[in-house]
Image: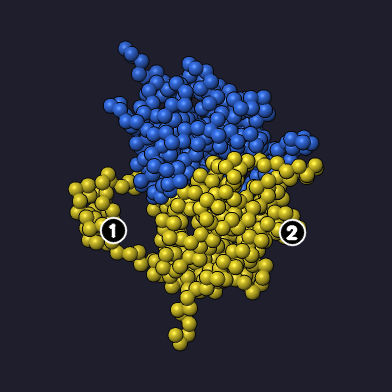
Chain colours: A yellow, B blue
Amino acid sequence: MEEVPQGCPGTGSAQAGRGASCQGCPNQRLCASGAGAAPDPAIEEIKEKMKTVKHKILVLSGKGGVGKSTFSAHLAHGLAEDENTQVALLDIDICGPSIPKIMGLEGEQVHQSGSGWSPVFVEDNLGVMSVGFLLSSPDDAVIWRGPKKNGMIKQFLRDVDWGEVDYLIVDTPPGTSDEHLSAVQYLSAARLDGAVIITTPQEVSLQDVRKEINFCHKVKVPIIGVVENMSVFVCPKCKKESQIFPPTTGGAEVMCQDLKIPLLGKVPLDPHIGKSCDKGQSFLMDAPASAAALAYRRIIQRIQEFCGHHQPKEEHLVGS
Amino acid sequence: MKTVKHKILVLSGKGGVGKSTFSAHLAHGLAEDENTQVALLDIDICGPSIPKIMGLEGEQVHQSGSGWSPVFVEDNLGVMSVGFLLSSPDDAVIWRGPKKNGMIKQFLRDVDWGEVDYLIVDTPPGTSDEHLSAVQYLSAARLDGAVIITTPQEVSLQDVRKEINFCHKVKVPIIGVVENMSVFVCPKCKKESQIFPPTTGGAEVMCQDLKIPLLGKVPLDPHIGKSCDKGQSFLMDAPASAAALAYRRIIQRIQEFCGHHQPKEEHLVGS
């Protein structure tokens, strides 16, 4: 079991490998040699790789089951409706990779070429990568501890041949742990545009989401805004609106006012969303006139506007 | 763990299906019998929901000679969570795996639970550090089993099958599956809507396929969310509701399972 010894001074500290608590640690020699303090070479490699990627968006939530993957998938679908926009969707949820199912790509395999791993293409302009494509069966549990998950995320960012991409969307698991730290760390030199944070209206969700916002501030990731999913449910028979996840503390609206963060939009509960996801189809295509689809589209537009104002520095122009 | 009779893990591959909600209400339900000592341990380090759901926000943990004292909701219901160790509920706990494992070890080793009939362990979604550590550290103490929570749609079931796979791999018995958010009954016209449609037959078909007991199905009820946000027991707030009745039937089945799995009495005096 990879366990940090009590009193570990940290691999990057001056005491690394030299402290009293380092005795007996299997990494003692490595740390004492200064290897732990050196930046991971993958960070520079990923920065190079990301030069062909204009905009990078993280989709986060402290809370599970609020619709991160659903939203990531439909953000990808929405952006890719413009054939001239190249979209890439990366699923770094190693334990519960939902993206292959939601994108209708179950059973697909990843191919290796000279230039790296090829993503699986839904459309010519929409490529997807997920650990789900590396499993022999969708029911296989990926029972990995943090370090192994980090290694996979590094490979995804460094070795996948995305090509020229306008938007890279990174779908994450719930929480503020290894996957999130690794994604931010490996993308640190490549400059993330920002994070979209997903929540549902009840306080139990908002509490975890505030932690996620706190995380973004700590690791200096800009916040594009918050999306509130599962806002209301409209009974198809009598049209009564029910708040199934009651916003006892004012929902995302009040939280965003308090924290001075944009609320990108609210998406109502719609059984068609779940059906489309299970069938691997785009809900935006399945139910384009629904309130939920319209809400998604407005949110996608606001994200595009945000990215439009945040052009990448053109440091790799020919001749500059 | 010798003073703890029954140990139950509450798991799901999927997030947001109601693990913490269920763990809390399993604890409340068992503790309604004053003679039953219940302990609820929250090992979700990044998103510890149990303090809020149990109405214990702001509580602090005390240390004594015999270890950390859990926070008591009732005389017979004690709770421990990393949430009690944070200076503010909005503080992010941004720890990598090894540090989370250390915390879980401390929770299991250093908390002075006392004589306990049921220890319920609430987990985060996934099949990673927290789950491996909990199983590893409890391996010698013999877990009664795991209750696995899902919602009806295939996207959830897919992750839940992975969790079931995990249980088989690490040899944790499965008590059964609970399907949350089954249907929603419109309070006005009583129409039933399947908000999370069971496109592949829901938990019922999955349990038949995998030959695992389906402990019960709980309908969506806005009162559940309200009670959780207020830190109250939904079983007390809405005792006659379909959801509360469903919870009670499930809790009873879990008690029956544990009743058939008595711990070996290897620590009897004089044996």
Quadrant occupied by the C terminus of chain A: bottom left
Amino acid type, callout 2? Pro
Q: Is residue A134 above or below residue A233?
A: below
What residue sits 78% from the left and 44% below the top? A239
Which residue corresponds to the image point at 79% horizontal and 36% vertical from the top-left?
A: B189
Of labels 2 and 1, earlier in sequence is: 1
| Location of residue B243 (image quadrant) | top right
Q: Quadrant of residue B130?
A: top left
Residue at numbered disc 2? A288
Q: Is residue A28 visible?
A: yes
SS assignment at label 2:
loop
Query: Which three-letter amino acid code belongs to the residue tagged 1?
Result: Gly
Q: Using the image, tell me which numbered label, if any, was put on residue B12.
A: none
x and y percent of residue A316 in the render?
Answer: 46, 80
Q: Disc 2 to disc 1, how far (Cα)?
A: 52 Å
The spot of residue B194 in percent (x, y) is: 71, 41
Q: How far across and how far down the image is residue A142, in percent?
A: 49, 49
| Chain label for disc 2 | A
Q: Quadrant of the N terminus of chain A?
A: top left
Q: Position of residue A64 (x, y in %)?
A: 54, 46
The reply to whether residue B209 is in sight is no
Residue appearing at x 43%, y 39% in the figure: B83
Mark number displayed over residue A12: 1
